[in-house]
Amino acid sequence: GDEHRLAGFSATLQAIVSFVENSSGDHIKFVRAGKHQIVFLVKGPIYLVCISCTEETFEGLRGQLELMYGQMLLILTKSVNRCFEKNPKFDMAPLLGGTDAVFLSLIRAFSWNPATFLHAYTCLPLAQATRQAASAVLQDIADSGVLFALLMCDHKVISLVGAQKATLHPDDILLLANFILSSESFRTSESFSPICLPRYNPMAFLYAYVHFFDENTYLTLLTPRSDAFFDLKDSRARIQDVLLKSNVLLEVQRSLHENVLRVEDVPIDPTSQSTSAPAQSSQGLNSQPLSSDEAIGGPAGLWHFIYKSVYLDQYVSSEFALPIKNPKQQKRLYKAYQKVYASMHDKATGPHKTQFRRTEDYVMLSWITQDFELYAAFSPLADKTQAIKICNRVCQWIRDLEDRVFIYGESTIAWQYHHCWGDV
């Protein structure tokens, strides 16, 4: 809305924050007003406020405000606080000029991108040899002052290399990708822009060299050097040459259209033909194997799932099945995922290991172990026993596909993770 017309409203919100600070020395968290929930996030001189009637949880809305604040830091760094210390009437708006599209894109992501509440990133499914080829060429330039090198396709990571002992938080990947994809200038020419990674160092700028190889695929090289543009331009040319010769870019485009996870493709357990049920693993949900005549998907079947690897901070999710094809239905499902995620991780009552919920819209089954988290949505008519069987099959399927859908086992200059899978 218009900034001047909202002045009185903004002043009221500021008065509420100040009243709580002055009367109790505390920070206000939220206010309930009928169907509306008003959530506050106080970050020094900066107040972030969300007013919602979507029935999202307080934790979920607060997490969204944290990401909004992180997006602001990516553009300005936390050193903007010093400007307010010197002059309480300092106007930050001119510094954020032209970034409306960035924040609007992030707000839209709260309705479709699981990374916003999972705090994990997702990879483009690729053959292991293709991903290794991409990683190898990025590793070759890692000693040229590059702190992080990322090859991405839209919001999905193709390859990620970091200098030794440097780690990149999934939230920073989310905010960086959102910044790049929602800024038209990055697409039209190779760019060199100061950015801050709030989880890496909120007080300092790095410099991002960004180049789009095609409409979807782009390279980001991050360095602390402000004079590195031409060096990184040369590095990009070498990287591009190798990616073209090794057909990586061709495989990326093919993966965009072919390598999707569909609930209909979850395999049936061949051991289910046996007359006696095998012993269940300690990691598996308490269920019997799925028989070959039990359909996955359909009126009483699996509609969608999200699987997160705890060790890798990566997730995969399926394509939407037919019952939830339109955007409104998909948005409703993500709201349900956010709610069940908050419930599973509720510090007051949990964390929980498993949860089964039946609503008018879905049956939601969630399962957390030391290795992974699984969130699955079924038809509201789904049977609990069948849902548990299908979740066991999904976990086994993802384990079979892990070489294609996750990044792990990189070289010594890349991220190091110990990936320990238990039996599912």
Image: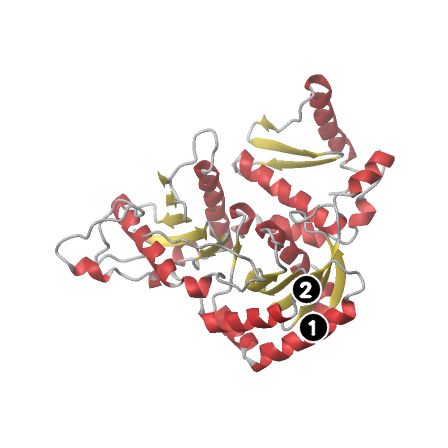
The quarter holding residue 46 reads: top right
Q: Are marks 2 and 1 in contact (CB under 8 Å)?
A: yes
Residue 165 coordinates in the image, percent (x, y) = 61, 54
The quarter holding residue 211 reads: bottom right
The residue that disc 1 covers is 235
> Residue at image x 48%, y 46%?
332
Badge 2 or badge 1: first in the primary sequence? 2
Relative to 202, residue 182 above or below = below
Residue 273 visible in the picture: yes
Q: Badge 1: few (under 14), some or many (20 or more) residues near its Cα, within 10 Å?
A: many
The quarter holding residue 195 reads: bottom right
Residue 44 coordinates in the image, percent (x, y) = 73, 34
Residue 41 coordinates in the image, percent (x, y) = 66, 34
Element under label 2? strand
Relative to 159, residue 202 above or below = above
Q: Which mark is residue 361?
A: none
What type is the residue that disc 1 sits on? Ser
Relative to 293, residue 77 above or below = above
The residue that disc 2 covers is 221
Relative to 152, residue 419 above or below = above
Residue 189 as seen in the image, left or right of residue 256: right
